[in-house]
Image (cartoon, rainbow, N blue to C red):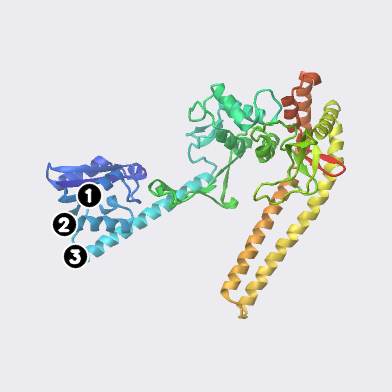
Amino acid sequence: MIAIYARVSTEEQAKKGFSLEDQLKECRKKANSDEVIEYVDRGMSGEFLDRHALTKLRNDVREDLITKVICLDPDRLSRKLMNQLIITDEIEKRGVELVFVTSEYTKTPEGNLFYSMRGAIAEFEKAKINERMSRGRREKARQGKVLRNFQIYGYDYDKETSQIIINEEEANVVKLIFDLFTRPNHHVEGINGIAKYLTNKGIPTKRGAKVWHRQVVRQLLMNRVYMGEFYQNRWNTEGMLGNKYKSKEERVPMRKRPKEEWIPIECPAIIDAETFEHAQSILEQSRRRWAKKAKHDYLLSGLIRCGDCNNTMVGVKTTNWGETVYIYTDYKNYAGAKHPGCGRRINVSKLDGEVWETILKWLNTPEEIAAATERDGEKETLDFDEIESERLHSEINKVKVGRKKLLNLFSDGLDVSEEEIRETLKELKDKEERLSKDLKELEKARGNKEQHIYGKKLLQEAVEFYFSKGQNDLTFEDKKSLIRHVVKEIRVYEDRMNIYTY
């Protein structure tokens, strides 16, 4: 039986116009017989061996069902020389004749050399095609054009202008999600609550699914495109095309490119920058804020931290002379705890009462919050930020100087082994990365001073929410929600507590 193999990838089909029917027609003419079996791979890259039709052909060759294999050109078998040679060897070992329409192939030293040269050229051509396509896409992006439809919820893709435009219906849902997440409300609590709310309301996702998952909501809240920041050339996907053919261990992960390689694209904003940044602040603490429900609910859970040892303080039930008592404590008794805590304990009712009285005072006299913020934390934070920033810069400079001295010693030919140099350089590199990360986080915190202004806006919204119900009608959950939309953290010391707001 004569086998005919044909393949076309999507890009080649579009660019070269050599369709599968054209290949099959030429191969049938070459076969000059009706006893043929056609093996066809549609839209499959020639870079990989794991193709459905090719695998079936190779199996049939091994089963001695095939006497001759006809293919339009060697690059239809594979775009990689090594894979071409593997397939050719498998076919010829079974005594099967291999024929190409576009060239004569002979099993001679000269024929093998020419065949290998053609395979190498095909592989080179494939690499050049990929390079030109990547360069073309980057140039198009630099011209301000969006390369494809990225399926971003809240936006549509305009093919004519190559831009993303606002989808008003979806944009309203985006605003609703940010509103539910950042403002006091009676409807939902946390990301999971938003996902359930949208599902119950029958609002479809971008792909038309009826169910919203919490991860989808989380990714939406973290997407900077909603405040007008959209980047292309952000991710390096090189080598990922073949992941579906590889085991989990061999798969190539998506890697983020250095920020200087990202290409910014102008796009319309749906959310203002203050709301977006506030959402990021809440997201950083969401693991603590919306933890699994405990047997006993605590008004300040996820907000309290010991001012001395920096451990978070959690609510626990204990007994005192046979009487049940609820306390907040910084003690950590689980395996792997970095710091067991300094043993600070404070009665739940006492701390809850003090914090709620302070919040009530702010709600009834909102101008108090500005003075409270400055008195309890702003100056202290600014002084600390300045000192810590100077220290981090100094430490980073020391690491750089140390690395330069080390390289100079090595270049001067001193008796220092290359292995010692490598280990020391790695230690210095790791230290610099840690210091740079700390500095970046510190500068980010310093750069968010506008959040203080936004915090006053949040307080005003909390006041409106509070007065819309009245103090006596506020439930435990109302109080908990109100506190979380005004208070970022509560630090407890031996003789005082500091309440830090947004």
Q: Relative to 33, is 218 on the left or the right?
A: right
Q: Which residue occupies 18% across, 43% down?
A: 37
Instruction: Please say whether residue 28 is visible from this viewpoint.
Output: yes
Instruction: Please say whether residue 267 is visible from this viewpoint.
Output: no
Q: Percent position (x, y) of residue 480?
A: 74, 29
Q: What type is the residue that disc 3 sits on?
A: Thr
**Foreground disc of the pair 2, 1:** 2
Q: What type is the residue that disc 2 sits on?
A: Gly
The C terminus sits in image quarter: top right
Disc 3 designates what residue?
108
Contact, mark 1 vs mark 3 (Cβ under 8 Å)? no
How crowded is the residue under tag 2: few (<14 C-alpha within 10 Å), some, or many (20+)?
few
Q: Percent position (x, y) of residue 314?
A: 73, 39
Nearer to me, 93 or 408: 93
Q: Which residue occupies 16% across, 43% down?
A: 36
Q: CA distance from mark 2 to mark 3?
A: 15 Å
Q: Quadrant of residue 199?
A: top right
Nearer to me, 388 or 354: 354
Q: Secondary structure at mark 2?
A: loop
Q: Secondary structure at mark 1?
A: strand
Q: Which mark is residue 388?
A: none
Q: Percent position (x, y) of residue 494?
A: 85, 44
Q: Which residue occupies 73% across, 62% down?
A: 395
Q: Is residue 252 above or below residue 145?
A: below
Q: Which mark is residue 95?
A: 2
Disc 1 designates what residue?
71
Q: Quadrant of residue 463?
A: top right
How crowded is the residue under tag 3: few (<14 C-alpha within 10 Å), some, or many (20+)?
few
